Each structure stands twice: as C-alpha cells, then as structure tokens.
Amino acid sequence: MPPTSVIVKMENPNNFSLVQFNGEISEKGSKVKSTKQLAGLLILRLQRLASPVFNSIIILKQRAFFKRREQTRKTWKILSFLKIILILAFLTLLFEIYAHWKQWNLGHMIRPQEVTTIAHAVYLQWLSIRADYIAPALVYLSRFCIVLFLVQSIDRFVQCVGCFWIKCKGLKPVLPKKANSYYPMVLVQIPMCNEKEVYEQSISAACNLDWPRDRLLIQVLDDSNIKSVQILIRNEVNRWKQRGINIIYRHRFLRTGYKAGNLNSAMSCDYVRNYEFVALFDADFQPNPDFLKQTVPHFKDNPQLGLVQARWSFVNKDENLLTRLQNINLAFHFEVEQQVNGIFLNFFGFNGTAGVWRIKALEDTGGWLERTTVEDMDIAVRAHLRGWKFIFLNDVKVSCELPESYQAYKKQQHRWHSGPMQLFRLCLPTIITSKISAWKKMNLVFLFFLLRKLILPFYSFTLFCIILPLTMFIPEAELPIWVICYVPVFMSLLNILPAPKSFPFVIPYLMFENTMSVTKFNAMVSGLFQLGSSYEWVVTKKTGRSSDTNLLETGKMALEKSISESDIELGGEVDEKEEKINKKRNRIYRNELALACLLLTAAARSLLSAQGVHFYFLLFQGLSFLVVGLDLIGEQVV
C-alpha cells in the first residue's frame, strides 16, 4: 500500500501553519493507524481552540516585561549626580590648596605682568567665572531653599503651639454617655506576610481582646509565600479556634496589590456585611485587652465619625541608637502632628494599623485601592473628601516594634515618602473638584502634601547636603550661621519635647535627620515622577519582641505550641534565607558614602578660610554620613 498522508491546516498561521502525518495503512493495522490519526486530529483541534488563550497570555507577559524594562530605565540616578559634584569639589579643593600654597594674594588688583604661569591664569579665570556666573545662581537657589526652610519651621512651630494649647486646656475626645453598654459587631483584621517572628504574639493579642465573643470575628490575612510559615500560622489559628475563639485563617493564591489587595480581598467576604466596624493591626502590633472598649464607643451617636486612630508605643525604643532616633521622630508625629490635626481639623493621615474604621465609611470611599504603596493615606484622604471625621486618641497606646537595622528603616522610609507623592499626583484633580471648603483644600494640597511631604525632603537635601558644601568652594554664596546652626538646633529641641528622655541625643538626631534626607529626597522624586523604585514594597523586618512576656502563655500548652518537623516538611520548601538568619554582615550604601566624601572635602576646604561653625557642622555631618554609609548604626541584617 502506498503511504497515506493526513494533512491538517490550522486557521491561525502565526502559530501552526501545516502539520502532516505520514504512515502506511494495511488491512490489519488500519484501525491502529486510524486511531492514531484521529488522536492527532483531536490534539490539533484542542491546540487550535486553546491558541487564542495562549496568545493572550504571551501578549500579557510581553507587555509586563516591556513595562518592567521601561520602569527600570526610568530610574533616578542620584548617585551619578553626587559623583559628579564630588569629583568637581575634590578637584577644586586640590586647586585651592595649590593656590593657597603659592600665596596668590587677591588683596590687591592683579596686574597682567604679575601672572607668571598658566595655572595662575586659570585660577584667576576661575575666580572671575565663579563670581559672575556660578555664585549668583547658587545664591538664588539657597535663598529659595531658606524661604522653604523658614515656612516649614513656622508650620512646625505652630503645631507645637497647638499641642501646648491642647495640654493647657485638657482638650481630648470624650466618650459618649452609656458607652459601657455599647457592643456592636467588630471585625479584627491582621494582615501579614512571612511574619514568622511576630505572628504568635499578634494573634494572641487579638484573641485576648475583651469583647463579647459572639460579636467579634478575627481574620488572619496571611499573604506568606513560604509554605512552612503558612503552616505555622494556620496551626496557630486552629489552636485558638479549638479554644472557642471566633477566628478565621485566609490565604490568597494570587498575591496582588500587597497589603491593599489583601485587605480588599478580605472585605469582599459575604459575612463581613454582618459587622459594623473593623479594627486593623499589623503583624507586630499587640493591642491591650481593653483596646476595643477604649476606641469603639467613640462611634456611638456619632454617625459622621469614620476612623478612630490609637497611638503607637515601641517595645524596643531603647534597643540601639537607631531606635532611639526613630522614637524621637514618631513621638513628635503622634504627640504633635496627629493630635493637633485630630483636635482642630478632624483629619489626619491614617497610620495603617492600630485603628478602627466604620465599614460604611470604607465602602463609601471605594474601599482599599492598590494604586499606591500608601493605601492607608489614600483611603484617609478619600474619606476626608467624602466628609467623614477622624478622632485621634493619644492616651490609647498599642505596642509595636521599630526597625532595628538601617536597611529595614531605609526601605520603610523610602516607601513612606514615595507613596505620598504617588497619591498626590492621583488625587490632586479630585481634591480641586471636591465639594469640601477652600480651607480644607488648602490644608490638603499645601500643608498635608506639599509642605510636609515634598518641601521638607527637598530643602533638607538641597540646602544642607548640596548647597552648604558648595558654598565652601564658592564663598560669595556663603550661608549665614543662623541657617545652619541656630534655627536647626531650635527646631530639633521642639521635635524632642514629646520624648524628653531623648534630650541627650538632640545633636545626633539633627545629624541623622540630615543624613536621612538623601533617602527621603530620592523617594520623593521617585514617587513624584512615578519612577521604577516608587513601586517597591518590602515588608519591614521584625525581631518578635513582646511587651508582655506572659501574653503568649495565655491559653496555650507546651504540647500545642510545638510543631513537628514532619508538618513543616509537608508544607513545602523552606526559604533559604531562614538558614542564614544568624549570619550578619555590614552593607555599603553608596549614596551616603558619596555625600560623606563631599562633606568631608568641603570641611577640608573650610579650613583654608578659617570658618569655625561651618567646619564643625560639615565635619560632624560628614562623619554621620560615613557611619550610616558603612552600616555602623543599628543592627546588621542578612
């Protein structure tokens, strides 16, 4: 028999153009060959039917790939900018030292016959260009930054006056009458992601909340991608469930949108409609048992109240120098900024945790959105535009952790300063067209976003890290002493008032804040222009410190607490990073090191002009950049 060919032509020539099966058909084997041919035809038809789906997936992958490449190209090269300035400053310093050694006296008019070398002529030409072109531009830029510095300082001073007024008058939110008998349905949400160090204490604290059990539901929203951690958290939830706690474990297979996506997914559950309020706690937060009794009653007889925010307290604030300096900043944030805005404006930025939301307010604002890395600030702004009011309780504190390593703190600050600029771009048209009063619009646009989120990191970095060292090489644009000494020290004293025990650290705090300006400025630019780094989300590393050593022992037995190794092995692979947890090493931060070299070079130049205050400021500021750049502050991490 001649060979028989079966030809199948596909409709989509881009994927499958021509497929041919060749074979010999005999009388005995005709059924076998026909069966194989039929199977081949069925496979090809299935491929034809599935090809549009595969094509769509390929196109989506290609778009995502090119989008990532585009975002990678759109990066803010601040290090290259610093390197150029550093090289120019170093070369100028060498030239200035050579001129000083040659004793090129500029006290009198230089005659042409006195110029004997090419170097002398170049130096005189440099002085002429510096005085006529470079100095005026630098003077205008420095004056602009000084104005911004003064405006921001006045804003901070006014906030301190407002806090002082609150203390003198005893102004604070008051619980309504008969609040002790008010027990609405409350949902508690604990979003977490690979929180192996803190999941036990956070779940334990939530399960020990003093609230009627039939009116409380705890959602553990686990976004972990490590199987062993998933098993640990799930088993912890099951142990509390066996003890009669109304608790649910939820894990998403599609981990999109980070924390906002996790919360949005949890709020879509059908049973959520039975609850009136939702309390949020990040994985390292440990609320006291009476937290709900101190916060939820404020909603009674106040239908316009959308949020009640509690203050943070830190279990490791005295762990090292880094945590002490963070405590100064956050103490001022809660004691002054949040409290003043809550009392006088009924609005402040939601801190993302340790707060209770009215679920109706969340639904009215559109719920959690995944468009920025500051979903908490996003929903607070949208709720404010919809007319909801906020209350800040300075007396209600929730224990949590501060980042103990500079790497963790740096990534946290990058997200906290790039996200607001993303949000500002997105919500500015909505703010302008909203129906709120002109004063509230000005507060949002000028004070909340521009002054405190954009202007502050801009002038801090530009004035103290760029202009100040450049003035050592361009003395025509010298900054006055009150700009670099008196006002900054006074503002640092105001910042440290809410944490009086930190008074001995006022000078290190001033130096460290200027050091962090490079990170905040970089994040601000990334968020404002939507560069690739503005979309980074890194979970802050925790150590698992607890404020109450007996908290984990409540309602738990030693046998229940231990998990067999076989249970963990069944869950999947263990992350390789967990095996290296005891190995620590120092990192190198090139931006900080580049600025350290620039400031120390400027300090050396200031010796030539005998500028005492400028020299000491540049010296100590350069050393602080050097310490941070070599990762000698805080704990080292893997």
Image (spheres, helix red, strand yellow):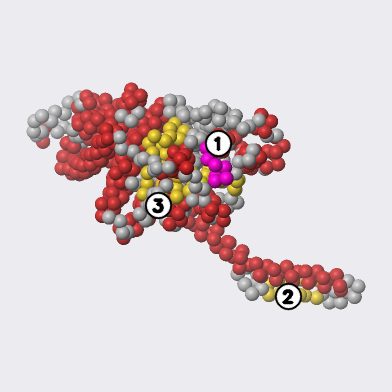
Per the image, is 475 magenta? no
Q: Nearer the viewer, residue 456 or 312?
A: 312
Residue type at mark 3 is Pro
Horizontal side of residue 214 vs 431, given as left or right: right
In which image quadrant can residue 516 be found? top left
**Neighbour tally class for label 1: few under 14, some 14-19, many 20 plus, Cα within 10 Å:** some
Q: Secondary structure at mark 3?
A: loop
How far is the residue under mark 2 from the one under mark 3? 73 Å
Q: Give me the residue at 24% from left, 39% from top.
A: 158
Q: Nearer the viewer, residue 54 or 13?
A: 54
Quadrant in the picture for the N terminus = bottom right
Q: Nearer the viewer, residue 542 or 136?
A: 542
View extreme (right): residue: 28
Horizontal side of residue 439 vs 74, given as left or right: left
User: Which label sits on residue 7?
Assistant: 2
How far is the residue under mark 3 from the one under mark 1? 28 Å
Q: Position of residue 85 (x, y in %)?
A: 31, 39
Q: Give me the residue at 77% from left, 69% from top.
A: 39
**Neighbour tally class for label 3: few under 14, some 14-19, many 20 plus, Cα within 10 Å:** few
Residue type at mark 1 is Asn
Look at mark 1 in the image and give the residue it sits on. Answer: 208
Q: Give me the residue at 21% from left, 34% from top.
A: 483
User: Which label sits on residue 631?
Assistant: none
N-terminal label among 2 and 1: 2
Look at mark 3 in the image and give the residue it sits on. Answer: 303
- Above/below status of 256 relative to 281: below
Q: Nearer the viewer, residue 90 or 272?
A: 272
N-terminal label among 2 and 3: 2
Per the image, is 211 magenta? yes
N-terminal label among 3 and 1: 1
